[in-house]
Image (cartoon, helix red, strand yellow):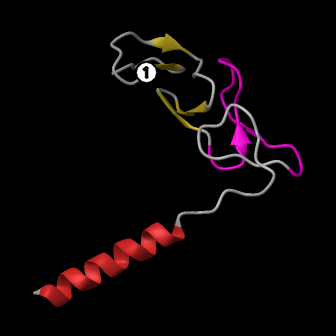
Amino acid sequence: MCSLPRTFSLEGSTTCTEGTCPAGQELSSPTECSLCQLNTFSNSFTGELCSPCPTGKFSGYGAVECLLDKPPSIIVSGMCSTQSASDSFYQAK
C-alpha cells in the first residue's frame, strides 16, 4: 500500500508512516515491518534493524528487551506433533 521507500503502514492502519517501526520490530523491506527474530531486540521506534542481545541474554520473537537467561526452545515439538497428526490423518483414510 505504501509506495515510497522507508514508509510503511502498521497492520490495520491506512496511513503511511515514514521510516520507523514500533518497538520489537524492524524494517524488513522498504515498506514493511516485521518482528525481531530470536535473540534480537528493538526497544525504540527508530531502528531499521533489531540489535543482537548482549552476551548471555536471549529473547523470543518481537522482543523489546533480552530478559531470558537461556535460549528460547524452538518449537520443534509443534512440528513433530503436526507431523504425527498428518500421519494419523493418512492412516485414518
Residue 10 lies, in percent from the top left, at 43, 21
Q: Is residue 22 above or below residue 54?
A: above
Q: Is residue 37 left or right of residue 93?
A: right
Query: Which residue corresponds to the image point at 59% horizontal and 38% vertical from the top-left?
Result: 62
Q: Residues within 10 Å of mark 1 (few under 14, many from 20)?
A: some
State which region is magenta.
37-56
Residue type highlighted by circle 1 = Leu
The residue indicated by pointer 1 is 10
Query: Which residue corresponds to the image point at 76% horizontal and 49% vertical from the top-left?
Result: 58
Q: Is residue 56 left or right of residue 81?
A: right
Q: Please tell me in which quadrant of the rendered image residue 43 appears.
A: top right
* Quadrant housing the N terminus: top left
Number of numbered discs on residues = 1
- Main SS of the magenta part reads loop
Describe the element under mark 1 as helix, strand or loop. Answer: loop
Q: Is residue 93 above or below residue 30?
A: below
In front of the other: 75 or 46: 75
Q: Is residue 52 left or right of residue 37?
A: right
Q: Is residue 47 above or below residue 34?
A: above
Q: Please tell me in which quadrant of the rendered image residue 15 appears.
A: top left
